[in-house]
Image (tube, helix red, strand yellow):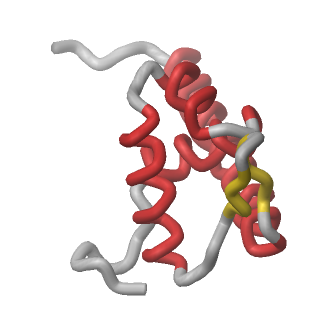
Amino acid sequence: MDNGDGGHADWDDIKTFVAAAQTGSFGAAARRLKTTQPTVTRRIEDLELRLGAKLFDRGLRGVSLTRAGEMVYDRALTMQRASLDIERLSLDHETPDA
């Protein structure tokens, strides 16, 4: 699981994974994230390599989560909710003087 950065998943890879899972296609995920399909593919492949598990079954009509992908998706949604909560916290408090 070590990719040179301590084996930690990149947050952008997680967001890309969630978008692909929700849209059912790497192309649709790319459009949602305003990036390219090859970038989405690379991020998903990097995440799969890092985790040592296939996250999507790929087909002509799009992608679907594998069992491992479903487990990662549940946790990724928890992470995404926590990130939004943190952003809301920062909006609820005064910003520090620049």
Q: Residue at x 79, y 67 (%)?
A: 66
Q: Position of residue 5 (x, y in %)?
A: 26, 73
Q: Is residue 58 above or below residue 34?
A: below
Relative side of 19 to 2, left or right: right
What is the number of callouts on the image? 0
Q: Quadrant of the C terminus?
A: top left
**Most foreground residue, 42 or 70:** 42
Q: Position of residue 30 (x, y in %)?
A: 51, 29
Q: Residue at x 53, y 42 (%)?
A: 16
Q: Position of residue 68 (x, y in %)?
A: 75, 74
Q: Is residue 94 above or below residue 74?
A: above
Relative side of 84 to 62, left or right: left
Q: Residue at x 53, y 16 (%)?
A: 91
Whether residue 11 is visible: no
Q: Is residue 51 above or below residue 71?
A: below
Whether residue 95 is visible: yes
Q: Position of residue 84 (x, y in %)?
A: 62, 32
Q: Quadrant of the N terminus?
A: bottom left
> Which residue, as the protein is rendered here, is positioned at the far front?
60
Q: Is residue 98 above or below residue 61?
A: above
